Amino acid sequence: MARGWLAPLRRLGWRVRGLGLARGSLEPGMRKPLVTLRNVTVGYGRRPAVHHLDGVLHAGDLVAIAGPNGAGKTTLIKALAGALTPLEGSIERDALKRRDIAYLPQLAELDRTFPLDVRGLVSMGLFGQSGAFGRNTSAGRNRVEAAIAKVGLDSLADRPIGALSGGQAQRAMFARVIAQDARLILLDEPLNAVDARTAETLLDLAAAWSTEGRTVVAVLHDHDRIRARLRQALLMAREMIAWGPTNKTLTAENLIRARQMAEGWNESAERCERSAA
Amino acid sequence: MIELFSPLIEYAFMRHALAGGVALAVASAPLGVFLVLRRMSLTGEAMAHAVLPGVAIGYLIAGLSLPVMAIGGLVAGLLVAVLAASLARLTALREESALAGLYLIALALGAIILSAGDRPLDLLHVLFGSILALDKQSVLLLASLATLVVVAFAELFRSLAYETVDPNFFRVASGAGHWVSTVFLGLVAATLVAGFQAMGTLMGAALMVLPAAGARLWTQRLATMIGIATVVGLVSVVTGLLAAYHLSWPAGPSVALVAGLFFIASSVFGRSGGYLSRLVLRRHLEG
């Protein structure tokens, strides 16, 4: 568990960011892509929700996904996680094993009436290592306890998830991600139902993951918070509008374009104009 | 006191009923708990009814052959679960309407097919079971099935729980997903088929749904819930059989009714979500 030797690296990461340089901009040619999206179209059944997306994620990237309601943000996160297969194009993540991917779904997807306590929920993060039939090791159990402590839920570890507030449940899901110890971390609206102070704490966690070399992608709604805390952003409205440094992505111009595209959507016309070309 | 319990030991038919009932209760409890937690109680119910036409077709083809009738029941039970899910996906129907529609069709079809044979089976036995008429072969089938379910369940437990509480997380973490619900439905169908002779097509899901739905109202812990459901199932079998013997009630419905009493009592007194517990909670919140 000792990450002490990472401390100097972490300090370096903070310092570089303090200088206003995205680490990615130091030597972009040197870094190997962790995930490559090529012309990705994803959707449910045969109805595409995200069209023709290209892009690359590197180790240590910290990317916000933003966009209006119905823009396909959740769909894209699910595709990155492997819960949805692209209808067209490809998502290459050959360097990653299944256990290297941690996925935090929207809080609403968690069935909180299920009889499970916080410790049980966080232990789900060990599934990738133990598999369906293996036992959880004592090292794994220690990791679970440490993760629960890290999000400040130690006193609630035995509480059923049905008795948690929304914010506490969200923190428990964060603890599950910590326990997973993954290289690619995908968060779908992780700050929903969370108060401002907890949100800052959770964003600190995400920033620390990034400094440790983990890749973090998070669907977030609050543009001011994205500008303040995340280096990169992907703005989308069923297709990519911009992807890059946050200040160049979340511009007034781009946001207006995204909103205009959202106003033009109607459910009956969902076919893809470009795929014929 | 001894006279009360002695029929369970004295008579071979009571011993067979007890052994078969115990095996069925043990297999049914954990499956029932997950049916309830996955909001699939009605699916279990529909599958129990759907077993009827499958068994009837098996009977028509091969006569009173246990394997053929069992395979027919298994196929029909699974078919209804799959059909209902497809109807819900491909049409504007909700799954509960699809399930209700399909099980009505299955029951009607089963009754008609049964009457078409040369030697019609006693419909009352087919509908409500004849647990007092279990022979050694049927008890053995029930016992082997209970063993299979318990072993399979122990292996499946974690996957099934995770897939229920957070299906998308499970799909990402395991790389699978659908096979869990498929295997689960298979176990449910197999148990319903094995219990068909004992409980009939109408009472078939009773030992799954009633103890589990009641247990849900007593605890927030999964293991405890399964434990309570199992004990309640076992007590229902013993009490129901004795009531049937001493009061000359039909046996299958007696077992179901005892489990039903627990269900009703739980909905009033259940510590974790029963009516009274919520009343206390509400007062507390008002105060």
Image: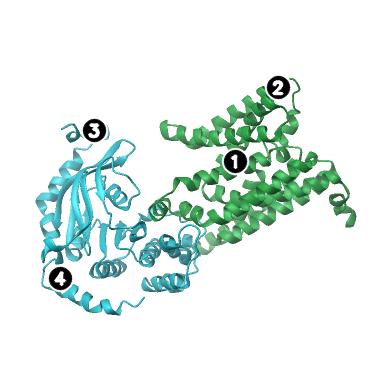
Counting from the top left corner in percent of width and height, residue A169 is at: 40, 62
Whether discs 3 and 4 lie on one chain: the answer is yes
Callouts 4 and 2 in the same chain:
no
Which quarter of the picture shows residue A39? top left
Identify the hue of chain A.
cyan
The tag earlier along the polypeptide, 2 or 1, is: 2
Crowding around mark 2 (Cα neighbors within 10 Å: few <14, some 14 to 19, many 20+) is: some
Q: CA distance from mark 1 to mark 4?
A: 59 Å
State the separation of the CA atoms marked 3 and 4.
42 Å
Pointer 3: residues within 10 angstroms few (<14), some, or many (20+)? few
For label 1, the SS is: helix
Amino acid found under the numbered disc labelled 4? Arg
Confirm or deny contact between disc 4 and disc 2 (CB under 8 A).
no
- Up-down relation of residue B203 to residue B111 (above or below): below
Chain hosting mark 4: A
Which label belongs to residue A17?
4
Residue B189 is tagged as 1
Q: Is residue A9 above or below residue B15?
A: below
Distance between the Cα atoms at labels 2 and 1?
24 Å
The reply to whether residue A184 is visible in this rendering is: yes
Q: Colour of chain B?
A: green
Q: CA distance from mark 4 to mark 2?
A: 81 Å
Residue at mark 3 = A271
Is label 4 in a helix, a strand or a loop? helix
User: What residue would you read off at disc 2?
Assistant: B115
> Mark 3, chain letter?
A
On screen, residue B117 versus residue B48, left or right, reads right
